[in-house]
Amino acid sequence: MTHKVGPKGQVVIPKDLRDQLGLEPGEEVTFWRDGDQVIVRRRADTPPLKGRFAGRQLTDRLEHERAADRGREDAR
C-alpha cells in the first residue's frame, strides 16, 4: 500500500492500520528514523502528574507516617 506525501509533508495512516493499532483521531504518535525507514508508534500513555493521586488521601497518610517517625525519634 502506498500513499503520496502532501505539500505540508503529511501522510494519511490507512484506516486498516489505524483500526489494527487502535489509533483514534487526536491521539499522538512518535516518529523516528531507522536507516531508510520512518517508524511511527503510538505515543506511550503517560498519565499527567496533576491529579494522579487524587482521592488517595496520600497527603494525610504521609503526614501520619511523618508524625509516627517523629514520635519514634523523640522516644530515643
Image (spheres, grey):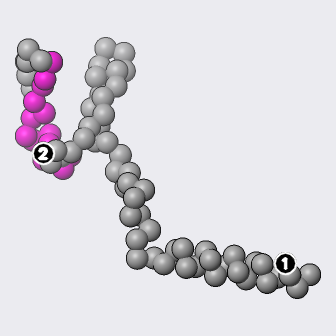
Q: Are marks 2 and 1 in contact (CB under 8 Å)?
A: no
Q: Nearer the viewer, mark 2 or mark 1?
A: 1
Image quadrant where one finds the N terminus: top left
Left or right of 3: which side holds 69? Answer: right
Left or right of 62: which side holds 39? Answer: left
Residue 53: horizontal and vertical position, in percent?
A: 44, 68
Q: For mark 2, what is the residue? A: 25
Residue 25: horizontal and vertical position, in percent?
A: 12, 45
Tag of residue 53: none
Image quadrant where one finds the C terminus: bottom right
Q: Is residue 53 above or below residue 34?
A: below
Q: In the figure, residue 50 lies in which quadrant? A: bottom left
Q: Is residue 72 visible?
A: yes
Q: Is residue 20 visible?
A: no
Most foreground residue, 15 or 44:
44
Looking at the picture, which amino acid does disc 2 mark?
A: Pro
Q: For mark 1, what is the residue? A: 73
| Mark closer to the chain start, 2 or 1 | 2
Gap in Å between the C-alphas at discs 2 and 1?
55 Å
Q: Residues within 10 Å of mark 1 (few under 14, many from 20)?
A: few
Most foreground residue, 30 or 21:
30
Point out the stretch of residues depicted in magenta.
9-22
Looking at the picture, which amino acid does disc 1 mark?
A: Glu
Residue at image location 52% in from the left, 74% down from the top = 58
Residue at image location 9% in from the left, 35% down from the top = 14
Q: Is residue 40 above or below residue 44?
A: above
Most foreground residue, 71 or 32:
71
